[in-house]
Image: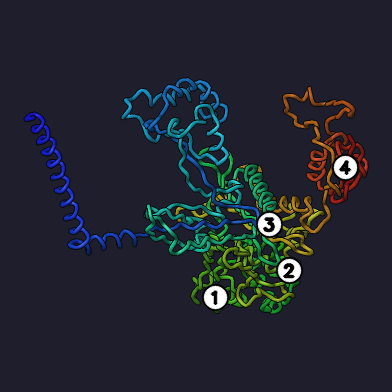
Amino acid sequence: MAIKNDNRSNILFRYGFVVFWILVLSACIVVQLAETTVVNAEKWNHKADSLLSMSQDIIPRRGNILASDGSVLATNLNYYTARIDYRAEKFNIKKLRENIDELSEALAANFPEKDAAKWKHYLLKPLEKEKDRRPRAYRILTNLSHADMELLKTLPYFKGNRNRTGLYFEKNMRRFNPYGNMARRSIGGVGETSESKEIHGISGLEKALDSLLYGRTGTTRKVNLTKDIADLAKIPAIPGCDIVTTIDIGMQDIVESELNNVLDSCGADWGVAVLMDVRTGDIKAISNLELNPNGPGYIEARNRAVMGYEPGSVIKTLSMMIAVEDGIVNELGGLDRVLPTGNGWAYAGGRPITDSHHTTGIRVGDVIEQSSNIGMARIITSRYDSNPGGFYSRIKEIGFLEPLNTGIAGEVVPRVDSVPSDRGGRIALSRQCYGYATEIPPLYTLALYNAIANDGVFVRPRLVKELRGSVDSVLQPSYLGNGRACSPQTAAVMREMLTNVVWGEHGTGRFLRNQDVRIAGKTGTCYMIENGQYNTGKKRLAFCGFFPAEAPMFSCVVLTCHPTKNFFGAATTSGQVMRNIAMKLYSRGMLGNSSDYNTSSPSSIGPTFYASVSGNDPYRHLRTPFALPNRKSIKGPKTSGPGVPDVRGLSAREAVDVLESNGYDVTISGSGFVNTQTPSPRSAVSPGHTVHLSLSR
């Protein structure tokens, strides 16, 4: 009985001990609860309020930059980085080792930056470390597209659960240019700010129109839910606007290609070309190329179209336009008045002004055609001799010195000094009027020539024509000055002068004659300034004009810097680029002509095999002649010789390329290979006529 009582006492003691500590713990809880909810209630309420009041920025979607037809020039794409957590909770080392060979082969086949052996070594290397020292974010691949990411998930070993494979992905948004470097400097680039994750433009349109492309940052607020605190949008982010540019993808490709070809041929340091629609001022194409410092060829360079350079003789057109418009030419006796030139003219006691063509005199109407410095200086100084600064005032009155506001970052206005009424000012005036002692961006020169082509209407060059976003907006063409650079009558006189530069007997641009597309324009040559003085061994060569001369549709300016081989004149370098552009536009039916080699209805024929015409094709012995069942043997092209090239036996694509490169329009009927052509091969038909091709299988 005593033992039984002792057991009972022990049990009661234990129960009592447990109950005591339960009561003590409960008391502590009650005390802490009272302290939290009563004594320190204000402190904790303040902390809760501050937590719930915390907010984060919502980064808006950046707008796209589009070509004139809606093609995407710059957009946002998500890229992924693949990583492996080698300390994942259930990381399956045994399975990795079992599948490593198959996995390495699959990775090498789909991501060949490493071969299978290197992939195997790379994936097993982290396992050499102690478990607690293995990486948690081991990088496997970067810059993966969504398709690449999904493909990676299907490879051996990676198919399993993330906790077992350790595979996971980080998402990053990047700005993507689908057309690569096409018009890249004008489109511009973006960068991430250091203090936030915001993406802003750092060059080109991306920078100039950043406020529109970026949109408006939103904010979140904390919401207390039953089991969690969630983020909800307090102020929604407003996506950026899509910017529709004036760039035409097809024309941009032509301009870049032709500029690159001529720069490569003449070995120039750099070049710029801009193509513009005469009526609207839409910049259809713009290209800036310079020698690649890290390798052969040319790369997209600084946007020199909006940078100031001494323009050379292309600016004589501005001086002559003012002279015709303001009656200076009439005061001298009209276009037929002959001005003395001799071997030079020392105006105001300055260094003699000379011409490259030595004559005793020049007709006023021929000054532009023959690019006479003396003639131009005599004309302008006849009016502004006593008031040299008046020439600057007249240029400003036209609107030539106004900001263009094209949207191209880095744009500067022309520098034309208002010179004093003294001997130095008079000498400076005589140089300004033919292109020296000034700095004028090529885009301003283009705007002036465009106005002449446009009957004097001084339309402002533009690179943006439409905004698409919360509120769509179509931007109408705008104008410089009072809307006119000159009267229609003056514009007509100037167009004739510029046409004579190419088609006149003594024109400096005679090299550019072409019966298919008549070009009008002006050559310009300027020595480059180095160490404060002119380097006569280095030239900048310019050509600015419009085409077709009789009914201008496009204006164009090209600038070539320091050619070193093959060609050295403005016409054979910069002018050649413009002529090639004009011919390409013509051959593709972009000048209102009917060059169209598409069939009238879609073909039901399957893929067509065609013969290679490459002279260095290693398989030419297999391909020429090239026979397929139920098909005629195809012979190589007979494109050399006079008259219409013989393109029989070629595919449609090859035949069109040969004929268009020789200046002919092309129409096609049938499918397969050229069977007959009309006119017949070697016919004495001049370029510009249409050649009809009949194709058969």
Q: Amino acid at mark 3?
A: Asp
Q: Is residue 377 above or below residue 543?
A: below
Toward which corner of the image does residue 163 lie, by quadrant? top left
- Which of 577/209 is in front? 209
The residue that mark 3 highlights is: 69
**Badge 2: residue crowd in 10 Å (few <14, some 14–19, many ≥20):** many
Circle 2: residue type: Gly
Type of the residue with mark 1: Pro
Which badge, 2 or 1, is on the more N-terminal residue?
2
Please tell me which residue lies in front, 412 or 368.
412
The answer to whether the residue labelled 2 contacts the one labelled 3, judged by CB atoms less than 8 Å apart, is: no
Residues tagged 2 and 1 counted as in contact (Cβ below 8 A): no
Return the mark for residue 644. Answer: 4
State the CA–CA distance, disc 2 to disc 1: 23 Å
Residue at 54% x, 26% y: name it. 108
Mark earlier in primary sequence (4, 1): 1
Q: Which mark identifies residue 460?
A: none
Alpha carbon distance from label 3 to label 4: 35 Å
Looking at the image, which residue is at 12% across and 39% down?
A: 12
Q: Amino acid at mark 4?
A: Val
